[in-house]
Image (tube, rainbow, N blue to C red):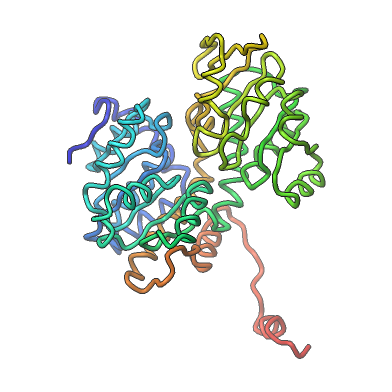
Amino acid sequence: MASEIRDINLAESGERKIEWVRRNCSLLRELEEEFSKTKPFAGKKITLSVHLEAKTAYLCLVLAAGGADMHVTGSNPLSTQDDVAAALVKAGLTVHAWYGATEEEYFTHIRHALECGPNIIIDDGGDLVNMIHNEMPHLIPNIIGGCEETTTGIIRLEAMNKAGALKFPMVRVNNADCKHFFDNRYGTGQSVWDGINRTTNLIVAGKIVVVAGYGWCGKGTAMRAKGLGARVIITEIDPIKAIEAVMDGFDVMPMNEAAKVGDFFVTVTGCDKVIDEEDFAVMKDGAILCNAGHFDTEIDMARLRKIAVETREQRKNIMGYKLPTGQWIFVLAEGRLVNLAAGDGHPAEIMDMSFAIQALSAKYLVENEGKLTEKLIDVPREVDNDVAIRKLAFLGKHIDVLTEEQKKYLNSYDL
């Protein structure tokens, strides 16, 4: 099927963005060179659904350099950059995506990207897996396996696997150390505040920031808020993570209490209705809400739109909602991923590591076709370590190596 994009004439702008990413992604550059020679994906079709901006585009080009027939779509209606999509089409890839897609258009694009009959899928949030299993099961026999990029997608996969519904192997890329330690913490932390700051043009110092969820993404978001001078409150359902937040110097309380005092709210949980009608009702006039979880359900936007007595766009990507109680609250990027819908996503150097994990995990699936007995698998430790070693080398850093005597000591019980 032919590509479906907004405007091929935007390609030059997209090419410049991709070139900047290539310059700053040392790991992917090295893999592109290796894959160009070894062609690990020769004869294979890959369907990819990830936020379609320049870093994702470069991953697609690296996989294509390895011989893959790439079919690309987005994983969020507001994160696709039309010039980047055009650049990929100009480079010979098949793309089905555009910015601002309706829900119907969004799922049509995913469906069309899958109609090629992929051998490998690369998913972000689980929409590819969900559509294959529920609408297009005839594709399953041809699929070697896939990779899942984010926490939300893994939550869905684990539920499927527990129910015995997952029909092909999926690699939990998000669980790799070189992914969640850096992408989720440092990448999310920086990109969330980049999105908030460029959208609101308001100071963070002296404000109260409420971060819902203290996983790796929440840790990064809270750390950066603290660095910007905010007082940070964490809301959690996990008592261990709550203790960790307290010992990291943050206050902890239930959302309905935090809602009364917060100036900025950031949800990063992977759950739905984290901020709901009861919370809206007690918020300050002028409270600013945004989401950094995958889906736009963490803030109960459906209910907010229903109870609002007036709505008004304040700035690009800021919608105001006047409540029956009289106060206004403001939501960034329609409650979708603020770092991508209102920003450029994670820094290139961070996604370099995450997408290197993606590329090498896809290669692992091809190399082990028919050999994997589990349906939900972790990134092999050797892949994680390979990425870390390569990254250290590019950073010009070196580490110690165990001597044979030390190895013997660590593997012996007779000390």
Instruction: Tell me the quarter of the image containing the N terminus.
Output: top left
Instruction: Tell me the quarter of the image containing the C terminus.
Output: bottom right
* Residue at 57%, 30% in the rendered image: 299
x, y percent for residue 73: 33, 40
Q: Nearer the viewer, residue 188 or 378?
A: 378
Residue 414 higher or lower than 256, as above or below: below
Residue 395 higher or lower than 187, as above or below: below
Q: Is residue 403 left or right of residue 141?
A: right
Q: Is residue 137 left or right of residue 344?
A: left
Q: Nearer the viewer, residue 381 or 398?
A: 381
**Location of residue 108 by image quarter:** top left
x, y percent for residue 370: 32, 72
Residue 353 appears in the figure: no
* Residue at 49%, 41% in the rendered image: 348
Q: Residue furthest bottom?
A: 414
Q: How many marks?
A: 0
Residue 92 higher or lower than 335, as above or below: below
Residue 399 appears in the figure: yes
Q: Is residue 345 left or right of residue 168?
A: right
x, y percent for residue 76: 42, 35
Q: Residue furthest left?
A: 1
* Residue at 54%, 52% in the rendered image: 179
Q: Nearer the viewer, residue 53 or 295?
A: 295
x, y percent for residue 399: 65, 64
**Location of residue 284 by image quarter:** top right
